[in-house]
Image (cartoon, rainbow, N blue to C red):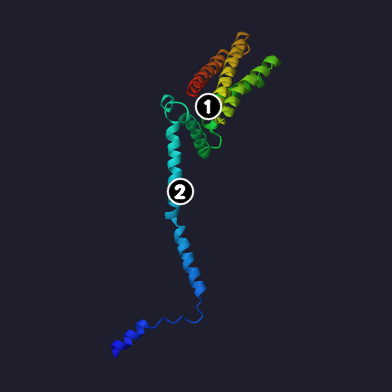
Amino acid sequence: MAERAGLLNRCTPLKRTEGSNPSLSANAERETVRERGNGPSERFPLFVFLFLFLFFCFIICTMPIGIRGSGSLKLFSTLSLSVTLSFFIMFPFEKLEVYKKAFASHQQVYALLISNVKIPGYIKNQYGRASLSIMLNIAEGSGRSTNKDRKSFMINARGSVFECVAIIDFLFAQNEVQESFHGEIKSGYEEISKMLYAMIKNLE
């Protein structure tokens, strides 16, 4: 009899508790499954993909120009550089050493033009515009998406450096600036010119 009673208990369906709702139970199960699906394990592959893509972009960007070759790989390296810089830095030119030097140089020029009232107005205007042109061309060129456009702006920036050298040499010859100032700012122009030249060659 005991065995028969146990068999009947196993075969008898479980009664629903009072007030239970089958639809609510099903919804609860679906919510549980959905929560499990939205856990870290499901988002992890997307993070890995993004990391690998950015890492690949970095590798391509740091390749020597000769290894990149030409054609599709060279185009992809340019796009990769733009994507990488845009992802990590809003204004990448601010991190460039050549831009920092051009910025500091223009601060010196600005102070000179403000303080020296003997320099003719047309020279002040020309010198100020040429000095400002260096940092502005570097800034604008860094925002371009192709090597051809970047190279063009860097060439313009280097041309403005040469213009500034000619002007400061003239002002020194006319005793409008001291020898120490002339030597310091001209040395800075030389460094900027060399850095821009290297950038131009790398963008070819």
Q: Which mark is residue 147?
A: 1
Helix, strand or loop for disc 1: helix
Of pointers 1 and 2, the one earlier in the residue sequence: 2
- Give neighbour class at mark 1: few <14, some 14-19, many 20+ (Cα, 10 Å): some
Q: Position of residue 149 (x, y in %)?
A: 57, 26
Q: Position of residue 33 (x, y in %)?
A: 45, 63
Residue for point 60% across, 15% down = 163
Q: Position of residue 56 (x, y in %)?
A: 43, 37
**Which sits in the foreground, 194 or 154?**
154
Tell me which corner region of the image, top left, top right, bottom left or bottom right, holds residue 109: top right
Q: Which mark is residue 46?
A: 2
Helix, strand or loop for disc 2: helix
Q: Which mark is residue 87?
A: none
Indicate whether 78 appears above or below 187.
Answer: below
Question: Which image quarter holds the N terminus?
Answer: bottom left
**Which sits in the foreground, 107 or 50?**
50
Q: Are marks 1 and 2 in contact (CB under 8 Å)?
A: no
- Distance from disc 1 to disc 2, alpha carbons, whole Å, reads 31 Å
Q: Position of residue 120 (x, y in %)?
A: 70, 14
Residue for point 52% across, 26% down = 147
What amino acid type should be assigned to the residue bearing mark 1?
A: Asn
- Give neighbour class at mark 2: few <14, some 14-19, many 20+ (Cα, 10 Å): few
What amino acid type should be assigned to the residue bearing mark 2?
A: Leu
> How many circles with numbers are drawn on the protein?
2
Residue for point 35% across, 82% down = 10
* Residue 92 visible in rendering: yes
**Which sits in the foreground, 15 or 159?**
15
Indicate whether 48 appears above or below 102.
Answer: below
Indicate whether 82 appears above or below 30.
Answer: above
